[in-house]
Image (cartoon, rainbow, N blue to C red):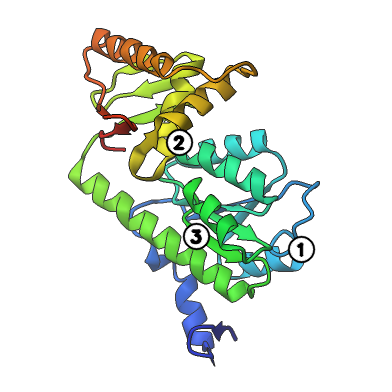
Amino acid sequence: MGQDMSKGRFLSTRDEVCLKSPRLFHSRSSPPAVILFSPSSSMQSGPANGPRLAELEAHGLTVSRCTDMPQLYAVARQAMENDRVCAVLLASGHSENCIVAAQLRALYPSLGVVAITPSSMETMWLQALQSGVDHICPASAPSQLLVAILFRLLWRLDVTAASAAASGRAVWSLAEHGWILASPEGQRIPLTTGERAFLMALIAAPNQRAPHAELIKAVNEAYALESAAALQSRISVLVSRLRRKCAEHGVGLPLKSVHNWGYMFTGAL
């Protein structure tokens, strides 16, 4: 039996069976999937070990383990291309979890992301959430709590996907590892290294709003710049060229400049 942490009582076997019911998911033909990112070099314990992984699978979850980032991105891309409800469980170190979460959030906005953290420090939790993580789960938490978090997240993603499919609304997205900006009209716009870094940082930011400093940092890191920080005019030129490139493809870039602060992506994602 599982334990209800909020009320201090045990869940019945009947409650746990309800979690496993395939009727929770309506919008996809394939079952939901969980991708566990657990590098072999990571010291983090918890769901990465055999018994905990087996417990997740025992609750009806299909779990794939990835031990490096290229493998993770490949498995995530395949899941999204196959139109599966999917969540990634990050069980690496804190810094790597944040980096991966930001990349995944930019590449696949509809992907669910849960981070396992061995620390209860609020600053680390805040960093993870700002990087694009949907939920935090302590490494010491029982498997029942982790399973409940995953099922609730997968259910929400499924409902959101069903609503989007019903409305037929087209959205903006980054394709091919972020090197292509796809418009709702179906136009595919190739991006430079700087444009890719700019859009990935902006889309991964909370509410798709980011200050100049964060965008400049993202572009500089993409070019591996180690000299003085780029001037704000560098971003202005980049945005101007990106707008012109989109216009040449017959689409208007939904990008709003926030005076003396940064930029906001206003298109549907």
Q: Is residue 176 visible?
A: no
Read off the residue under disc 3. 135
Question: Residue lying farthest bottom?
Answer: 9
Does the residue at mark 2 contact the one at mark 3 (Cβ under 8 Å)?
no
On screen, 81 above or below 255?
below
Q: CA distance from mark 1 to mark 2?
A: 31 Å
Quick one: label 3, few (<14), some, or many (20+) residues within 10 Å? some
Residue drawn at x 55%, y 66% as measured from the top left: 60
Kind of residue at badge 1: Gly
Q: CA distance from mark 2 to mark 3?
A: 17 Å
Q: CA distance from mark 1 to mark 3?
A: 22 Å
On screen, 143 above or below 15?
above
Read off the residue under disc 1. 50
What secondary structure is marked by label 3? strand
On screen, 163 above or below 50?
above
Read off the residue under disc 2. 106
Residue 127, position in %: x, y? 54, 51
Quadrant for the C terminus in the image = top left
Between marks 1 and 3 in the image, the one whose residue lies nearer the viewer? 3
Q: Earlier in the sequence, mark 2 or mark 3?
A: 2
Viewer-proximal residue, 158 or 214?
A: 214
> In the picture provided, is 57 more to the left or to the right than 101?
right
Quick one: label 2, few (<14), some, or many (20+) residues within 10 Å? many
Between marks 1 and 2 in the image, the one whose residue lies nearer the viewer? 2
Kind of residue at badge 2: Ala
